[in-house]
């Protein structure tokens, strides 16, 4: 790309040239051009368009007044390609069609819309390289920003170049590759100034203009107009805008009103403009004087010379004129074709509260929410509240806006709105709903110690109005209290009576309540009923808000673990992941991925667990939410790495008691693996003292193993006694047999192995062989010991538990035998994402189906699979089914 015609832009031109070249060769590229207003960013974008030889070019631009309309910017970009919508997989086609108002369907998530846009653009780029150019991205509506930020982070093997022009911050585009566009140097600035000055100018004035413009090309073009009056102080952007205001001020009143109408109508729709002009009663040719300024062009679309011209026209107009113009635009906007824009113009044209106008905005909010535009819905509702005359209804609309903001992830903004709701007239139900929402937000922000009392209180206050919602809220409160490590017994008893007949949620709540208030033995029967009901429950993506409580590690997962039912625990995690994926609920998917990763680690599937952990991290990059990261604690403990000590300290300081307990549980595992049994014992005792659901059971084996090595025989016996009430499953029977063996009943070592052989818990099986082999070696039975220690070493190595495998190797050395380390196989080179794609391909999923599950384009999936085939040594999917990885 040459910088011909653009003075001083060689560096930027070369960067954009490289971007196009790499995209043309099949390596997707993204770049953010950032700089102040007038610095020449749009000119560079025009250069990209002109130099994109062989590319199809699609352009869009953010408009300040368009930010209220969901997907407005995105629709501009995708509109030329919507004839390909039928080529998308059905869930993506439905999501994008609903988002654009072309079809009605379930409310789409921004991530499913993002995947649909990625697939659509990749389809276009398969035919011809594609350059997507987005100007004034600081003014994109939030949903368009979120979706395009998602797409930008998923470009890999697509022939797509995506360039954003940005004046100031856009949270959704943060962290993308960026090029800061700086001012021209003095020589180029002087050359540009010389090209526009007519007639002689004093050298000192020229120097002053160059100095004041600081290399800004638009300033160099506009500031000479101020020479006669002297150069005013103040921010450069404001001074440029004031230059435009001074050019507008002498125009006839009708011309200024016409330009104001154009500035207030963000679509640039000439037909709409002239119809509004007719209603306003403007003169015969109000456009002539405007055209003479060069600030605006009238054609099929109305365009201002620069966004600062639009803002100068709008801001310099009187309030009365702005109201008049918006009322005219509302009157000429078809309520059947564009009801939301009409409602918006009516609101902008209304100075006093008006219920009819507010109701129109509320209807617009409903339509925006149905299309997945939660932030837009919140904005409509906020504006509706401002225009609502009746205080109670105003507070209800503010509450609805707060809910929409929370659902969109704008948690702090939601809390600010809740403060406004509380300032409204007293209403007990609304106050309970506010407290409920505050509790949810506290949980979302991981302030679980704050969430629990808010949710318990909300559950009590909701009971007279909605007993079912009250019980659901009580279950949420119990979960928050569990995660906070707060005292539970008293609060657990305060739930509303169950429905008759009870539903799955009722049974889970009653099971947990019994477990908390009456102990393990009394809870076995209700926990059994709850698990039976949950296993039979049919839920879909529409029930995603219930999934964490019913299947995740907040409620149903807790019951499954307390019942020592690993298969059900794992199945719940898999179901939670599937439902979260189908719904595109990525924050909930992060928690589900960690729950499943924990199960995969226990099952001795370290590669599968790593793929899930990596996906949590990738989602974090897309959403801006921190990784959940709980599974990393167990993974690190198995690897012999200590990340739990720091996590424990942070969790304790933040009031996240359960996370501190998890950290102690994994510390016990870590230290047992490293042979530091005194430290393992101390960590295990801290878990025991917490009396935490799930972990007070899981820690028992770690405590007994550590105590048996430190000579604390009383602790071993105590651990055995703790297991007496447990329900019998192959998992629990394997642990009980281990406890008996460590307590002196040596034949129970073999019994423990036999039990674990009938489970999917390969890591526990490897440890069972290790403990038996260690005991046999100490008893002098070297031949028998070697058999178990070899098995332990091979199993624990395969399970990603090297410290325990090293223990087995040291014991083998002590028997006089040397164990060979496993050599790495070609499949060991697979990345976590490649492993995940390979598994899905082996299970029969197509590239589009894999892309939908992992939020990748089909072309990127194909690119990864080619790498997988090379590493595994196969040439087809059929061969992949028999490959080992």
Image (cartoon, helix red, strand yellow):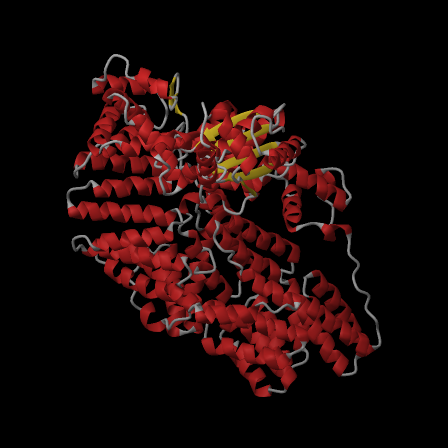
Res 525 seen here: yes
Q: Position of residue 248 (x, y in %)?
A: 31, 26
Q: Nearer the viewer, residue 362 or 730?
A: 362
- Please tell me whether residue 517 is drawn above or below residue 455 in the rendered image: below
Residue 477 quadrant: bottom left
Q: Residue at x 61, y 71 (%)?
A: 669
Q: Nearer the viewer, residue 663 or 32?
A: 32
> Horizontally, is 747 left or right of 821 in the view?
left
- Please tell me whether residue 346 is drawn above or below residue 380 in the rendered image: above
Q: Residue at x 58, y 61 (%)?
A: 632
Residue 22 quadrant: top right
Q: Residue at x 27, y 43 (%)?
A: 382
Q: Position of residue 882 (x, y in %)?
A: 73, 45
Q: Nearer the viewer, residue 634 or 286?
A: 286
Res 98 seen here: no
- Please tell me whether residue 424 is drawn above or below residue 730 in the rendered image: above
């Amino acid at each position: 790309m040459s910088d011909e015609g653009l003075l001083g832009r060689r560096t930027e031109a070369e960067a954009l040239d490289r971007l196009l070249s790499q995209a043309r060769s099949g390596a997707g590229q993204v770049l953010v051009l950032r700089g102040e207003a007038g610095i020449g960013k749009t000119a560079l974008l025009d250069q990209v368009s002109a130099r994109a030889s062989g590319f199809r070019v699609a352009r869009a631009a953010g408009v300040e007044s368009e930010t209220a309309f969901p997907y407005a910017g995105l629709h501009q970009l995708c509109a030329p390609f919507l004839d390909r919508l039928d080529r998308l997989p059905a869930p993506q086609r439905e999501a994008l069609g609903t988002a654009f108002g072309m079809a009605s369907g379930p409310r789409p998530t921004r991530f499913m819309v993002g995947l649909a846009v990625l697939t659509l653009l990749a389809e276009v780029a398969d035919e011809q390289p594609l350059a997507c150019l987005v100007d004034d991205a600081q003014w994109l509506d939030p949903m368009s920003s979120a979706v395009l930020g998602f797409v930008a982070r998923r470009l890999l093997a697509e022939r797509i170049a995506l360039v954003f022009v940005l004046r100031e911050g856009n949270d959704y585009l943060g962290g993308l590759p960026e090029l800061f566009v700086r001012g021209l140097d003095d020589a180029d600035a002087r050359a540009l100034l010389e090209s526009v000055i007519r007639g002689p100018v004093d050298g000192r004035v020229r120097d002053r203009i160059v100095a004041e413009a600081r290399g800004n090309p638009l300033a160099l073009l506009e500031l000479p107009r101020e020479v006669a009056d002297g150069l005013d102080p103040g921010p450069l952007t404001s001074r440029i805008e004031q230059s435009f205001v001074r050019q507008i001020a002498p125009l006839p009143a009708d011309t200024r009103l016409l330009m104001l109408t154009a500035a207030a109508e963000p679509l640039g729709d000439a037909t709409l403009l002239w119809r509004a002009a007719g209603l306003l009663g403007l003169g015969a040719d109000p456009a002539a004087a405007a055209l003479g300024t060069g600030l605006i062009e009238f054609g099929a679309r109305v365009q201002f010379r620069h966004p600062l011209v639009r803002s100068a026209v709008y801001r310099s107009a009187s309030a009365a004129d702005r109201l008049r113009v918006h009322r005219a635009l509302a009157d000429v906007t078809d309520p059947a074709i564009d009801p939301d824009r009409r409602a918006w113009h009516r609101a902008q044209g209304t100075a006093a509260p008006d219920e009819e106008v507010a109701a129109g905005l509320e209807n617009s909010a409903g339509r925006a929410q149905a299309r997945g535009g939660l932030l837009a819905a919140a904005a409509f509702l906020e504006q509706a509240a401002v225009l609502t005359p009746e205080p109670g209804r105003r507070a209800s609309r503010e509450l609805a806006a707060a809910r929409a903001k929370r659902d969109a992830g704008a948690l702090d903004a939601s809390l600010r709105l809740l403060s406004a709701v509380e300032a409204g007239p007293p209403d007990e139900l609304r106050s309970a709903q506010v407290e409920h929402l505050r509790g949810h937000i506290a949980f979302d922000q991981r302030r679980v110690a704050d969430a629990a009392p808010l949710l318990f209180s909300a559950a009590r206050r909701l009971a007279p109005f909605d007993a079912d919602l009250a019980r659901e809220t009580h279950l949420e409160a119990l979960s928050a209290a569990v995660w906070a490590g707060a005292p539970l017994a008293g609060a657990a008893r305060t739930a509303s009576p169950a429905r008759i007949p009870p539903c799955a949620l009722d049974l889970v709540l009653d099971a947990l309540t019994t477990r908390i208030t009456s102990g393990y033995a009394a809870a076995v029967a209700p926990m059994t009923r709850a698990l039976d009901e949950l296993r039979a429950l049919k839920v879909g993506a529409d029930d995603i808000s219930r999934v964490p409580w019913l299947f995740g590690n907040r409620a149903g997962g807790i019951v499954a673990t307390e019942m020592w039912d690993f298969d059900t625990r794992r199945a719940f995690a898999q179901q939670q992941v599937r439902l979260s994926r189908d719904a595109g609920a990525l924050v909930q998917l992060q928690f589900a991925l960690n729950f499943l990763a924990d199960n995969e680690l226990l099952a001795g599937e370290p590669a599968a667990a790593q793929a899930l952990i990596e996906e949590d991290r990738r989602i974090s990059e897309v959403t801006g939410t921190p990784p959940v990261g709980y599974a990393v604690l167990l993974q690190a403990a198995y690897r012999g790495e200590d990340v739990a000590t720091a996590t424990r300290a942070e969790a304790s300081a933040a009031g996240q008691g359960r996370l501190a307990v998890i950290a102690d549980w994994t510390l016990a595992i870590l230290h047992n693996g490293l042979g530091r049994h005194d430290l393992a014992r101390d960590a295990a005792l801290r878990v025991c003292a917490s009396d935490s659901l799930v972990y007070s059971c899981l820690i028992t084996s770690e405590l007994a193993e550590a105590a048996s090595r430190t000579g604390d025989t009383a602790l071993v016996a105590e651990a055995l006694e703790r297991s007496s009430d447990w329900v019998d499953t192959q998992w629990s029977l394997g642990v009980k047999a281990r406890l008996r063996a460590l307590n002196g009943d040596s034949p129970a070592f073999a019994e423990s192995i036999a039990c674990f052989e009938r489970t999917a818990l390969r890591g526990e099986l490897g440890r069972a062989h290790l403990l038996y082999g260690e005991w046999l070696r100490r008893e002098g039975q070297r031949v028998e010991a070697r058999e178990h220690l070899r098995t332990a070493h091979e199993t624990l190595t395969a399970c990603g538990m090297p410290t325990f495998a090293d223990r087995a190797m040291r014991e083998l050395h002590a028997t006089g035998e040397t164990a060979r380390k496993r050599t790495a196989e070609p499949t060991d080179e697979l990345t976590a994402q490649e492993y995940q794609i390979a598994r899905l391909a082996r299970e029969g999923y197509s590239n589009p189906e894999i892309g939908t599950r992992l939020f990748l384009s089909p072309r990127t999936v194909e690119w990864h699979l080619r790498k997988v085939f090379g590493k595994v040594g196969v040439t087809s999917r059929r061969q992949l089914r028999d490959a080992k990885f």
